[in-house]
Amino acid sequence: MESKPDKPQPKDDKDALKTLAMPELMKKLGSSADGLTQAEAQKRQAQYGPNEIVEKKTMEKHLHRNGTQIVKIFLHLSKDEQRKRFLARIDEPDKNWKFSTSDIHERKYWKHYTEAYEDCFHATSTHHAPWYVVPADDKENARLIVSQIVLDALGDLKMAYPKTTAKRRLELLAIKKMLAK
């Protein structure tokens, strides 16, 4: 894909991620993103543009400036734990629906996905919207870690009930009198 002359050229590999087009990402992964065909991915790229990482960072910065606390959590599962969970999905009829044969095909690209995730985290983690990579082999501990991240984020909001003014207090006392009758 040829870049337009008015767009700045990437300084290094990390900066290049900001302008990575969907087909290039798919080529790096050796597969289609989200199970899309090449044609579907190109259609999505045309619809959303090749610069989604920069757009997401801009959106996140805008949300942060306007008071939104952004928490991005990636549950990291080891390849061995993924294998165990796949086997459990096959063995337990109630979990058969979770399993897809495409999962086995995609496991061949584990290293490529790992590199792509690392690149993505590096490119999109900022002070106002950091990534939290949570080890998820142990579900119970992963849930505790995620809970703590969310509690910490809520605590950082410094929320409080609005203070009642003297005028509002008088209004409430008048309403209370009416309700007491």
Image (cartoon, helix red, strand yellow):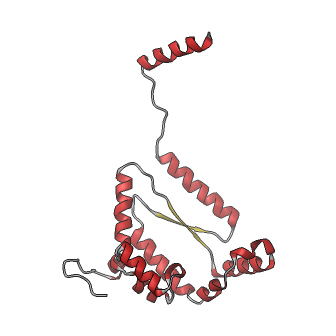
Where 30 sits versus 88, above or below?
below
Where 17 sits versus 138, above or below?
below
Give how far across and how far down residue 78 sits, in percent.
63, 78
Residue 6 found in image quarter: bottom left
Where 165 sits versus 146, above or below?
above
Residue sitting at the far left: 6
Position of 57 with respect to 31 (left or right) is left
Where 53 sits versus 11, above or below?
above
Position of 93 with respect to 1 (left or right) is right
Residue at 45 percent across and 27 percent down: it is 163
Residue at 45 percent across and 57 percent down: it is 70
Position of 31 with respect to 92 (left or right) is left
Q: How many marks?
A: 0
Give how far across and how far down residue 88 sits, in percent.
76, 77
Q: Which residue occupies the foreground of this view, 12 or 110?
A: 110
Residue at 46 percent across and 87 percent down: it is 38
Give how far across and how far down residue 16 sits, in percent.
33, 80
Give how far across and how far down residue 181 sits, in percent.
62, 9
- The N terminus: image quadrant: bottom left
Residue at 54 percent across and 81 percent down: it is 35
